[in-house]
Image (cartoon, rainbow, N blue to C red):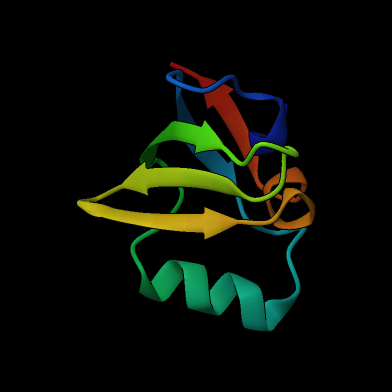
Amino acid sequence: MSLDEIVAGQKAKVLSLQNLPRANRKKLMSLGILPNTTLTIVRRAPLGDPIQVSAAGINLALSNLQAKAIEVASV
């Protein structure tokens, strides 16, 4: 399952970032979004894009395209 399929308020564990372009993958990894990290979907923008994600003490916004490329498992 990908991160864009998770509902607001639900938690998910990152399985893989391999589907992201290298630059995006490195940036997310430097922010602490690594495999086995637990993410929480805080909310979605009114039109559905971007998604606000909370992880490792930080909040960040991801586009649906980025979220679609992150493989997760529901927690």
Q: Is residue 51 above or below residue 1?
A: below
Question: Residue 42 location, x and y as percent?
Answer: 42, 33
- Image position of 38 (left or right of 57): right
Question: Residue 65 location, x and y as percent?
Answer: 79, 54
Q: Name the image quarter holding the N terminus.
A: top right
| Residue that appears at 46% across and 48% down | 35
In-front residue for pair 25/50: 50
Q: Is residue 19 above or below residue 75?
A: below
Count of all numbered marks drawn on residues in the image: 0
| Residue that appears at 50% across and 77% down | 27
Q: Name the image quarter holding the C terminus.
A: top left
- Image position of 74 (left or right of 71): left
Question: Residue 28 location, x and y as percent?
Answer: 49, 68
Q: Is residue 30 above or below residue 46?
A: below
Question: Residue 2 location, x and y as percent?
Answer: 71, 34
| Residue that appears at 56% across and 24% down | 73
| Residue sticking out furthest to the bottom | 23
| Residue that appears at 45% across and 44% down | 53
- Image position of 5 (left or right of 31): right
| Residue sticking out furthest to the left | 57
In-front residue for pair 47/69: 47
Q: Quadrant of residue 60?
A: bottom left
